[in-house]
Image (cartoon, rainbow, N blue to C red):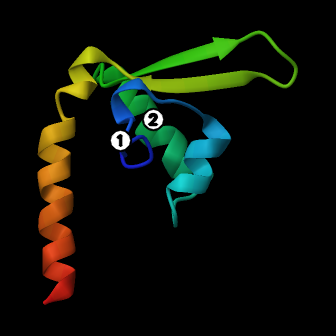
Amino acid sequence: MIGIGGANAENQVLRYKELERKVVGITPTMLTKCLRELECDNLIHREQYATIPPTVEYSLTERGKTLIPALETVYQWGEAQMKK
């Protein structure tokens, strides 16, 4: 979710490498594990294309999109705490 957030989070489709660049400080192994868990919880959709090398894209599901307001609130709270 962290890498998918932003102004157009509801409609964003991101490739694995884009997520890897956006989520600072995470290992590829941990990112893959987190993405698999989010997919199992039906929060993100994973689309794999039969290309060489394989192309994998991630997007929020309808269920995942319902989390955006709560995550924005937590983000705003964190920003306010950093300013103190």
Identify the residue at image location x=16%, y=62%: 76
Image quadrant in which you'd find residue 79: bottom left
Whether tag 2 and tag 1 are in contact, CB under 8 A, the answer is no
| Marks 2 and 1, the one that precedes in the sequence | 1
Identify the residue at image location x=34%, y=21%: 40
Q: Please indicate whether residue 4 sits to the left or right of residue 15 in the image.
A: left
Q: Where is residue 6 in the image (x, y as percent from the top left)?
A: 37, 46
Image quadrant in which you'd find residue 5: top left
Tally the numbered discs: 2
Q: Residues within 10 Å of mark 2 (few under 14, many from 20)?
A: some
In the depicted structure, whether residue 11 falls above or below residue 9: above
Distance (Cα) linking label 2 and label 1: 9 Å
Q: Nearer the viewer, residue 18 or 54?
A: 18
Q: Where is residue 16 in the image (x, y as percent from the top left)?
A: 62, 37
Q: Please indicate whether residue 11 sits to the left or right of residue 64 in the image.
A: right
In the depicted structure, whether residue 5 falls above or below residue 81: above
Q: Is mark 1 on a helix, strand or loop?
A: loop
Q: What element carries label 2?
A: helix
Q: Where is residue 29 in the image (x, y as percent from the top left)?
A: 57, 48
User: Mark 2 belongs to which amino acid?
Assistant: Leu
Question: Which residue carries the number 2 mark?
Answer: 35
User: Mark 1 belongs to which amino acid?
Assistant: Met
Q: Position of residue 25 (x, y in %)?
A: 52, 67
**Residue farthest along the front direction in this orientation:** 7
Question: Which residue carries the number 1 mark?
Answer: 1
Q: Which of 44 and 68 is in front in this view?
A: 68
Q: Give the quarter of the figure containing the C terminus.
A: bottom left
